[in-house]
Image (tube, rainbow, N blue to C red):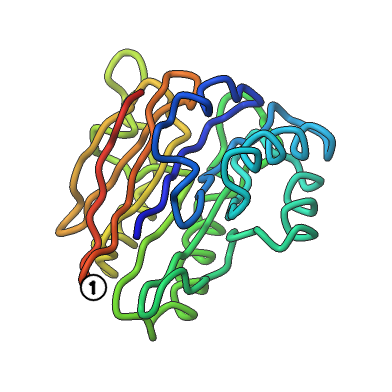
Amino acid sequence: MYWIAFGDIHESTDMLSLIPDLADAEGVIITGDITNRGSREAASSVIEAVAKYNPRILAQPGNMDTDTVQAYLQEQDMDIHLRVREIAPGLGLMGVGLSTPTPFGTPGEVPEDTLISWLNQTYEKAESFDQLIVAIHEPPHGTKLDVVGGGQHVGSPGVRAFIERTAPKVVMTGHIHEAKGMDTVGTTQVINPGMLAGGSYIRIDYVDGQVTAELKTV
């Protein structure tokens, strides 16, 4: 079985039709930034566009999503923010959305201490799983996945420390559009597919009890 994951949709869904393995996936995981400071209607429009290809959707808000977007995801029972869901026997999916403060004053920002607390508290719900996949909108600091123009690393030290301590199999991240790629933190594979409009996504396979992930481009 496998899942398709992407984020940083920002209300642009044209690339969905080009993902060849989307319809047959066990489900779709959206890692954040569904909208552009959007309304319930904007979130609904994106989710409906995804559902045309695969209705089994799990999603969380990013820093560009409002509380209204999160409420909509909860109403649809597809939210993963601060939750852990079993997506296959022994395999858990944990989510922590939003981001630390940005220069742009986006609606879904929290202090670093809050993000760290969320990660630790949510992980307590995940310790019973044999293997864990984690969706964190904010990338870990000091990797290929948090570099903005000029080479500055802007990711979260707390996210990195959490990954080093808990060693999930795969972490899916985003937020920094220009830092698309793959890296490792300790033994954990970390992937930022960039903006969906760029045509990249993550495929996560679960075969014979083993999790693998790859960054793919249409």
Q: Is residue 46 left or right of residue 92?
A: right
Name above or below for residue 20 compared with residue 208: above
Name above or below for residue 57 compared with residue 9: below
Give percent across and percent down for residue 186: 16, 57
Q: Residue at x 33, y 45 (%)?
A: 203
Q: For the C terminus, which image quadrant?
A: top left
Farthest residue, direction bottom: 128
Image mark count:
1
**Residue 128 versus residue 203: which sits nearer the camera?**
203
Q: Residue at x 51, y 49 (%)?
A: 28
Q: Residue at x 59, y 41 (%)?
A: 62
Q: Quadrant of residue 102?
A: top right
Mark 1 sits on what residue? 209
Q: Is residue 204 left or right of residue 185?
A: right
Q: Quadrant of residue 83?
A: bottom right
Q: Is residue 128 left or right of residue 102?
A: left
Farthest residue, direction top: 150
Amino acid type shown at disc 1: Gly
